[in-house]
Image (cartoon, helix red, strand yellow):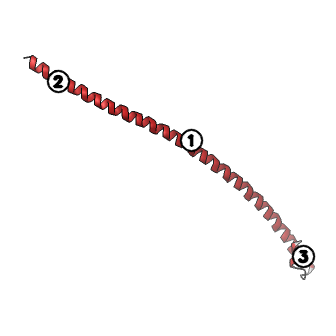
Amino acid sequence: MIANVIVPAINKPHRMYIEERVEQLEKQQETTARAVADLTVDVRAIRHDQNEGFRQVNIRLDKVEARLDNLEADVATLKQDVAVIKETLQMVMAYLREKLP
């Protein structure tokens, strides 16, 4: 026992108290060590879940970005089409003004 090594010269009642206290502290240390080990496992699991969640979010963001790029390209095409239609209508209107009195 640690108390016997540390305090051999202390009288018996004090030595018994110290021995009991040392045993209590050793048990608390074991309990604390188990709790720390459990928490370490929990933290690792949380980190794994968090990393997996970020990975999935990044995959989804990549898909959204790709869709956005496609939409931007479609909008650019539509703007060009509208410009052509507008130009065509202006030519038709000019022609009609010229031909109609």
Q: In this view, does 83 lie above or below 56?
A: above
Say whether disc 2 or disc 1 marks the residue closer to the N-terminus: 1
User: Could you say which disc has been placed on residue 4 in the image?
Assistant: 3
Q: Are marks 3 and 2 in contact (CB under 8 Å)?
A: no
Say whether disc 3 or disc 1 marks the residue closer to the N-terminus: 3
**Residue 49 relative to residue 94: left or right:** right
Q: Residue at x 41, y 37 (%)?
A: 69
Q: Which residue is drawn at 76% across and 61% down?
A: 33
Q: Is residue 47 above or below residue 27?
A: above
Q: Foreground mark, 3 or 2? A: 2
**Residue 79 relative to residue 51: left or right:** left
As shown in the figure, which amino acid type bears the numbered disc 1? Gln
Quarter of the image with the C terminus is top left
Which residue reaches farthest bottom? 9
Q: Residue at x 92, y 78 (%)?
A: 12
Quarter of the image with the N terminus is bottom right
**Residue 87 relative to residue 71: left or right:** left
Q: Is mark 2 on a helix, strand or loop?
A: helix
Rendered image quadrant of residue 38: bottom right
Say whether disc 3 or disc 2 marks the residue closer to the N-terminus: 3
As shown in the figure, which amino acid type bears the numbered disc 3? Asn
- Could you give the CA–CA distance between mark 2 and mark 1, rounded to whole angstroms? 53 Å
**Label 1 neighbourhood size at 10 Å, few (<14), some (14-19), many (20+)?**
few
User: Could you say which disc has been placed on residue 91 in the image?
Assistant: 2
- Could you give the CA–CA distance between mark 3 and mark 2, rounded to whole angstroms? 109 Å
Q: Is mark 3 on a helix, strand or loop?
A: helix
x then y, percent, for residue 63: 49, 37
User: Could you say which disc has been placed on residue 98 in the image?
Assistant: none
- Identify the residue position indicated by label 1 in the image: 56
